[in-house]
Image (cartoon, rainbow, N blue to C red):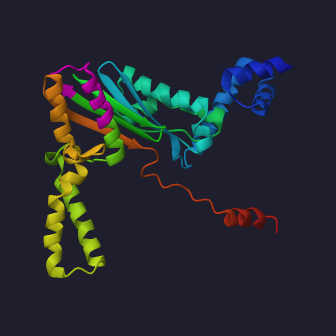
Amino acid sequence: MSFTASDVKKLREMTGAGMMACKKALTESEGNVEAAVDHLRKKGLAAAKKKQSRIAAEGAVVTATEGNKAVVVEVNCETDFVSKGDDFQNFALKIANDILKEGYADIAALKTAKEEIVNELTLKIGEKIDLRRFEAQETTGAFGTYNHGGRIGVIVNVETAGDKTSAEFQELLKDLAMHVAAADPKFVSANDIDEDFKNKEAEIYRGQLKEEGKPENMIEKIVLGKLNKLASEVCLLEQKFIKNPDFTIKKLIEEVGGKTGGAITLKAFSKFNLGEGIEKKEDNLADEVAKMTAGSN
């Protein structure tokens, strides 16, 4: 059974696969377009599985809100070029909106539900796609969100007994989200700092002080002093407001609460940095050339 150029065009539109892949699929399926679709999906699944061992550290961090729900999600691909394309950007946004609508319990559930469309996009763009992580929140108050070019995403969960529609409150939401992006807090308040975090920081301080040559009998005293200042460095409420260092975030919230007619409580925040914690592959051109030429000698 033969096929025409219009069959190839139709198959490309249906699958997003390249022209040569479509021609090969139609040849294998003797011109049957539906069978060619199945062929490409099977090949795509196999190809997608092969790509899962690759490193995907580029991509997009997306923030989205709907009603009383908000989400920040990181979707990865292999190259910055692909991450800027419409196919990838639309896919990442769809994932964020689907999380809001479907309420997936965790990243494992999301990956299971989206396995098929991830494989289809992998087939289309030729790169590994990874649904890496997400954090979703619900509120009885309001959300502040900030997204820095798809590389940093923040949501801040704030509740109030005052006027949520006031200009002061809306400005506070924006300021809090931008502050989190810039100041990188780890906890909401000092009460949230766990002992494991304190112990880890104490060990880092000790190592730094020893490297600086501080006397052994002074190190523990200095470490204790640094731990006492820890809250002002890593706790959102204790940090100095980036737009006005005369205010802590706690003081800023109290002041805005006074203007809007009700106490304001900062309940939670989430922040993702694109590719954070992923060890990126460092390409070595000399090594690559050596590998390519070794087999020809």
Residue under the image location 23 percent in, 44 percent down: 236
Name the quadrant of the N terminus: top right
Q: Which residue is drawn at 20% across and 34% down?
A: 266
Residue at x 78%, y 65% (from the top left corner): 293
- Of residue 271 and residue 28, the one placed in the foreground of this image is 271
Quadrant into which the C terminus falls: bottom right
Question: Could you tell whether 100 is left or right of 50 in the image?
Answer: left
Quadrant hosting residue 219? bottom left
Span highlighted in magenta in the image: 159-176
| Image position, residue 256 (x, y; %) | 19, 30
Q: In this view, does 134 lie above or below 291?
A: above
Q: Quadrant of residue 101?
A: top left
Against 40, residue 50 (above or below) is below
In this rendering, would 209 be left or right of 130? Answer: left
Picture coordinates of residue 161 (x, y %)? 14, 22
Residue 286 image-quadrant placement: bottom right
Image location of residue 66, percent across then percent down? 36, 20
Q: Is residue 171 located in the magenta-colored stretch of the structure?
A: yes
Query: Does the magenta portion include 132?
Result: no
- Please name whichever residue, 94 or 248, is drawn nearer the observer in this view of the structure: 248
| Residue 226 falls left or right of residue 297 | left
Residue 38 in picture, x, y percent from top left: 67, 24
Q: How many marks?
A: 0
Residue 19, relative to residue 128: is it above or below?
above
Q: Give 159 or 125, whichever is nearer the viewer.
A: 159
